[in-house]
Amino acid sequence: MGKENIVTGNDVNHPGYYNRGKVECIDAIESMASNKSPEQAFCLGNAMKYLFRFPDKGGSQDLEKAIWYIKRVIDKEKK
């Protein structure tokens, strides 16, 4: 196994692509989700995750995934 395949504790617990300045994605999601239904919290949390990481990991596909989750919440709100 090459060195590039070794996962460090920091890569698991605090990957760089989930940190922006002093804000870690999980902390922002927990704060946002505190007054949402479980389904809204799940969908919006996933959207936030993709928005946090898109420039460093998934590119435009992460933006498309975020939009998909946000549209799901919008569609449920309209019913």
Image (cartoon, helix red, strand yellow):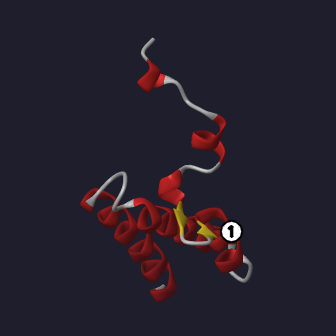
For residue 31, what is the image quadrant? Answer: bottom right
In the image, residue 37 lies at what x, y percent?
Answer: 68, 76
- What's under tag 1, amino acid-wise? Asp
Residue 42 location (% of width, % of height)? 60, 65
In the rendering, at what x and y percent does residue 38 appear?
68, 69
Q: Residue at x 55, y 30 (%)?
A: 7
**Residue with the most extreme bottom position:** 78
Q: Which residue is drawn at 39% across and 76% down?
A: 71
Query: Which residue ends up furthest to the left in the rendered image?
Result: 60
Q: Which of 67 and 26 is in front in this view?
A: 26
Q: Report helix, strand or loop for mark 1.
A: helix
Q: Horizontal and vertical percent for residue 40? A: 59, 74
Q: How many marks?
A: 1
Residue 75 appears left or right of 12: left
Taking 56 as reference, is 21 above or below it? below
Q: Residue at x 51, y 85 (%)?
A: 77
Q: Quadrant of the N terminus?
A: top left
Q: Which of 33 and 79 is in front in this view?
A: 33
Q: Which residue, as the protein is rendered here, is positioned at the far right?
A: 34
Eyeballing the image, is 79 above or below 63? below
Residue drawn 65% across the image and 79% down it: 32
Q: Mark 1 points at which residue?
A: 27
Crowding at dot 1, Cα within 10 Å, few <14 / some 14-19 / many 20+, comes out as few
The residue nearer to you, when weighing 10 against 32, is 10
29 to the left or right of 34 = left
